[in-house]
Structure formats: structure tokens, C-alpha cells
Amino acid sequence: MARSVLAELDLETVLQRVLEAARGLTDARYAALGVLDGSRAELDRFLTLGIGDAGRAEIGDLPRGRGVLGELIERPEPLRLAEVGRHPRSWGFPPGHPPMSTFLGVPILVDGLPYGNLYLAEKEGGGEFTADDEEAVVLLAEFAGVAIDHAGRYTGARRRQDELERTVATLDATTQIAKAVGAETDLGVILELVAKRGRALVSARALLIEIVRGAELEVAGAAGEFPPELLGERFPLAETVASAALRTRRTQGLEDELNRSRYEQHGLGRLGLDAAEGLVVPLVFRNQTYGVLIAVDRLEDGPRFDADDQRLLEAFAASAATAVASATSVAVEQHRQRLAAAEAERRRWARELHDETLQGLAALRIRLALARKGEQREALDDAVGEAIGQLEEEIGNLRALITDLRPAALDEFGVAGALETLAGRVGRNGLQVQLVLGPAGGGLGGRPVRYTAELESAVYRVVQESLTNASKHGGARRASVELRDDGATVEVVVWDDGSGFDPGAGTEGFGLLGMRERALLLGGTLDVDSAPGQGTTVRLSVPAVRADESDAAPGLRSVGG
Ligand SMILES: Nc1ncnc2c1ncn2[C@@H]1O[C@H](COP(=O)(O)OP(=O)(O)O)[C@@H](O)[C@H]1O
Ligand SMILES: [Mg+2]
């Protein structure tokens, strides 16, 4: 950034940058930042972005913090709405105010106390603000709090300018990380970015990120000069400088003698990372510790880091911790697994389409082309006859594939009906399936029970995959599928008389992984009982949620959601 701009930096500039970053991160048309007054009950100031001066003049008085904005003041928690005008506290907009529907509001805390709120409205493209947007703005707000705190704290002119200059650099780094957290589900990529930006901020020779994994530390990210084999290395947490930083929740320096010996005997020093000086900063988010940032050897005017470096790195660590926390959260992990499973499934369809259908059609094309070149009418007739037969077969293949993708029977007849169709199809391919559907299947004249779409798909997929495995891997001839529902739990048991396998042997592919993933998502379990020579039993057990129960009463639906 140009020096001239930096010279004018002050709190206003920081606020403006936060506003711009928030708008850029979320593709919002309008962004605003409301600053609370001393009583913390009303807005004292209201900075906007996206509404021109003319628009502002027309709207007149800036909001004081009633209506939906008041909601955020009273309850400082992220608020995401599809239609802000439908919120029960909506006051409506004053004349001249541009129309706004989608809305995202996130509080900014300074030193643990409400300072103000970030408001975003009208996501470009017409969609709603997403959970990723919310996450990114929460991350930004977290840092904004630190930056505002800093901007207010330093008054000496030269010092202040330096401080602000670096505050803005941290803000930029944070914004990039927030962006990455929104777009990336790969923790490794995020950590690499955190390491690089953190290193640049304090001009460290190297910056490493250690994440706590149970009783161990893992070197999960690194930038700068470091022995490459360090990345991914794990070692005991006990006795390390990191453990001291995590226990005290305070930055530890290597100039401390005890820390120095911890570093050399138990930490990265023992693993070959030389350090003349170093800072070890804990990653704390919402009172939970995730690991540490370790910066070694300042390159400019080093190797010692000064108090400013430490403060800066601590500010940066606050946002890095948020990123690490959200990237390691269960939700993201599940998302990642789901993507992998979906990708594997897609690859399977691609392979099947290519191997079966496409190759069959290509062969057919060649046959017909050859026949047309030939002289004899008869040969052409034969070829056409064969072609029709082959086309019918390919149509059948495609039908089966389409049915596999999302069986129409599942939507139309529910699980029981779809399983009957499936059993019939598998039976024609040489695996005899006995179905025991029980009352869930509807019975005589009864209507089959309908569950939520996710539950029905899960049951179907588990049975489908189990039967495929039974004939493909186990060479099974007979199988049974039992469906039970005691009102609270739906249980599906698939048994086959095939060769069996050792489920503990770690040969699990995407089939079994996908089954477990589905069970997990529905709050249930999946057990595989098998041994070589003994057949296989797969048991899925999930809470029974019927289709009519899953719809919340209209009055309970969240506003604007
Ligand atoms: N019913 C079964 N009978 C015998 N072996 C099985 C059965 N189900 C699974 N397996 C074994 O477990 C492995 C993993 O299965 P799965 O996760 O479905 O992946 P994939 O089918 O893609 O190999 C199979 O390769 C096979 O060795
Ligand atoms: Mg399989």
C-alpha cells in the first residue's frame, strides 16, 4: 500500500478497511458498520459502503439502532436473514432507502465487550448469504475487534502510524485467510496460508503451526526455512514450549532459559529446527486451545522479535485460531468426507458409462459404418437387426444406471417398494434376495411408511451397496434384507452367504465409508459383521424420522429462513 495513504491512517481508516473487506468477502452490495455509544444500547455512528452521498442525504437520519439492528445490539450474535423486512422487529425502511432483502449481521467485540456491528445486505446475484459468508465475516469481525483496540491504544504519532500500518497489513492477511476458509475445505491449504502470511508479518525466518492431536503435537503448516521432513511430524506435547504456551495461554519466548531447554530437548529444536530467537503464540478460539504458532529468528534487525512483533503475532493468532477452529470442526470434516464419497460415486458413474455404454455404442457405430460401405443389401439388413438389439441393451443399461442414481421407485413407493424393485433386478443377475419388510413395508392393504428423503436414500444405498459387495467381492448366491421399525429406530440388516472378509483389515473402500457417513449424518450407526468364510452381515440403525414429522409447524419456522 502506498506510503501516502498510510500516513493518514487512523481508526477511521481501519473501520473503512473492515467495511470494504466485509463487503468484498461476501459479495454484498451494501455494507455498514454501526458503532455503539457509551451506553451500548444505541448506535453512535453508522458508516456505510455502497450507498452514495446522494442516497445518504435522501435517507436522512442514520439509524440509531432500532428494528433489526436493535436485535443485534441486544443479542450480539450473527444474524442471517433471507428477507430482512419479515423479521418481527423490522421497522420498515425510511423513504428513499434502497430496497434490501438478504441480510447478514455480525457483532464486533473489543476486549470482550460489544463495540458495534457489521451489517451486510443484498448479496450480488440475488442469492442468500451463506454459512460460509457468515463464517468469513465472523472471522473478520474477530480481527476487526483486535485492530480497533490497537488503533485506539497508541497515541504517539510515529509509533501510532507504524502500528496502524502493521495493523492494516494484519487485516489484509486476515481477510485473505477468511476468504480461504470460505472457499477451502482443505485444512492443509489454510494452514499453509496462515504460515506464509504470519511469517511475512513479523519477517520471521520460519513460521510453523503445531496443532494439538491428543497427547501429541503435529507440525501441520510451515513457511520459510525449515527442514522439509518436519512437516507432518508428530511428537509428544509434554514438556514442550507449546505446552507451556497452551497451559498459560500466553506467548512464550525462547530467550527464557527454561523455554530454551524445552525447545532443545523436547520440541522442534530436537527435530532440527535451529532458532536463535523465537516466539511461541497459543492459538485460542472461544476459550479452546488448538495449537501454537512458532516464529523463529527475525530477519530484519533480528534475530530478536520486539514487543510489537509479539503483539502483532498475537493479533494474527486470534484470527488464525478462528480459521483453524472452523477448518477442523466436525462439520467441515463431514463435508470433506461427503465430497470425497460423492466424487468417488461420480467416478464410478463415469467409468460405467464409459466402459459399458460408450464402448458399446462405439462398436455399433463401426459395425454400421462398415455395413454401409459394403455392397450387399443383406449384410446391411443383418447389421441393422443386430444394431437394434444392441441399442435395446444399451437403453437397458442406461435405465439401470439412471435408476441407480435416484430410483424413481424410492420417491413413488418409498423404501419398501424400491427395495422390491432392487431385489428383483439383483435376482435376475444371479443373487437371490429374500426380503423381510415387516410392517414398515405396508403389509396387506396398509400404506407403506414414508420416512424423510435422506433416510429413505440412506436405507436404499446401504442395501444397494451391500448387495453389490456381496456378489462382486463375496461371490454370494443368497442374501436377505430385513427392514424393522419399532417406532423409534429403523434397522436394516443385510446378510449374504458369500466369502466374507476381515472388516478390521483396513481394506475399507468408498462403499463402506459412504455407508458409515450416511449413518453418521442421520445420527445412527453402521456395523459390519464378517469373517473369511462366514458370509457378511451389515446392520444400519438410525432414528426413525417419518416424512410428516420432519416438517416443523409453520409457526416454528425461523423468520425469513
Ligand atoms: N459382502 C462382502 N463380502 C466379501 N467382501 C466384502 C464384502 N463387503 C465388502 N467386502 C470387502 O471390503 C472391501 C471394501 O468394500 P467397499 O468399501 O464397498 O469398497 P469397494 O466395493 O469399492 O471395494 C472390498 O474390496 C472387499 O474386500
Ligand atoms: Mg463396494
Image (cartoon, rainbow, N blue to C red):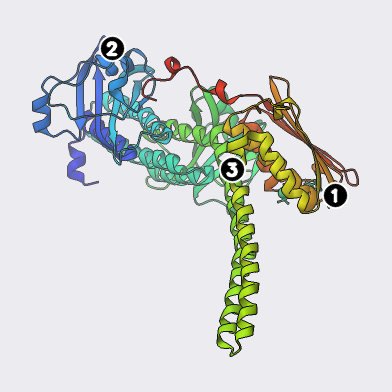
Q: Quadrant location of residue 419?
A: top right
User: Distance from label 3 to label 2 (Cα)?
Assistant: 57 Å
Looking at the picture, tell me which residue is in the foreground, 493 or 198.
493
Say what secondary structure mark 1 lies in: loop
Q: Nearer the viewer, mark 3 or mark 2?
A: 3
Query: Horizontal and vertical percent for residue 328?
Result: 55, 35
Marks 2 and 3: in contact by CB < 8 Å?
no
Regarding mark 2 in the picture, which secondary structure is present there? loop
Q: Give the image quarter of residue 117.
A: top left
> Residue 90, image x and y in percent?
27, 17
Distance, label 1 to label 2, CA atoms, is 73 Å
Residue placed at 49% from the left, 19% from the top? Answer: 552
In the image, 474: left or right of 176?
A: right
Q: What residue type is labelled 3?
A: Ala
**Callout 2: few (<14), some (14-19), or many (20+) C-alpha neighbours within 10 Å?**
some
Residue tagged 2: 40
* Mark 1 residue type: Arg
Q: Which residue lies furthest to the bottom in this view?
A: 375
Residue linked to disc 3: 408
